[in-house]
């Protein structure tokens, strides 16, 4: 057996194992971050005055409306993400919300994206944003309501 053939067999085995793990990984990402989005959104909505005050400190226009919009997007978008229903579609407003969070609440981390990557990746919005980008790029996976209702699987 030559080196190329051995590599090919190992690569095929690893690719097969990765294929089996993909639906579980996407379920875990959607589940964890969907639930986390739900909780943070619910927190914003249940403590609307505190959230509005924080948004006012950030000099956001229409702070109460923006607090309601961000909280609702996170709360209801998180539930949809958790269920895997409309996952790619709902990931778009969640991505937008996390970009706005970077640009307002974590401005310093965003500005250090190239100079201090640890600060950028350590900011609160980073993992939320990463999870949404993964779901947007790969879909919700085979273990989702999207796959069940629309007979689609992750591509």
Image (cartoon, rainbow, N blue to C red):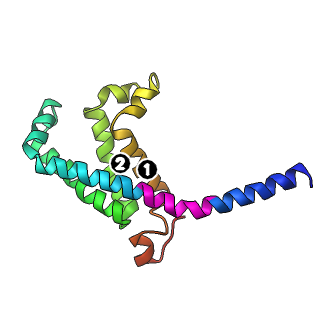
Q: In which quarter of the image is residue 112?
A: top left
Disc marking residue 150: none
Residue highlighted by disc 1: 133
Cα distance in 3D space between marks 2 and 1: 7 Å
The picture places residue 34, in percent across and down from the top left corner, at: 33, 56
136 left or right of 48 in image: right
Q: Marks 1 and 2: in contact by CB < 8 Å?
A: yes
Q: Which of 94/141 is in front? A: 141
Q: Give the residue at the far top of this rendering.
A: 115
Q: Residue at x 51, y 70 (%)?
A: 153
Residue 110 point in image, percent of width and height:
36, 30
For residue 62, say whether it is visible.
Answer: no
**Is residue 11 something one can see in this rendering?**
yes
Instruction: Left or right? Give the position of 136 relative to 95.
Output: right
Q: Position of residue 66 (x, y in %)?
A: 16, 45
> Dot 2 corresponds to which residue?
95
Q: Residue at x 38, y 62 (%)?
A: 87
Magenta part of the protein: which range? 18-29
């Amino acid at each position: 057996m030559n080196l190329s053939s051995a590599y090919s067999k190992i690569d095929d085995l690893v690719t097969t194992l990765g294929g089996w793990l993909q639906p579980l990984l996407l379920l875990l990402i959607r589940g964890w971050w969907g639930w986390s989005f739900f909780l943070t959104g619910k927190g914003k909505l249940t403590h609307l005055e505190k959230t509005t005050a924080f948004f006012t400190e950030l000099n956001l226009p229409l702070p109460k409306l923006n607090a309601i919009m961000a909280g609702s997007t996170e709360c209801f978008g998180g539930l949809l993400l958790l269920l895997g229903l409309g996952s790619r579609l709902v990931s778009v407003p969640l991505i937008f919300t996390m970009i706005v969070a970077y640009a307002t609440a974590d401005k310093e981390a965003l500005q250090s994206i190239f100079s201090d990557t640890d600060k950028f990746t350590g900011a609160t919005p980073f993992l939320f944003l990463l999870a949404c980008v993964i779901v947007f790029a790969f879909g919700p996976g085979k273990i989702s309501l999207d796959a069940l209702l629309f007979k689609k699987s992750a591509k």
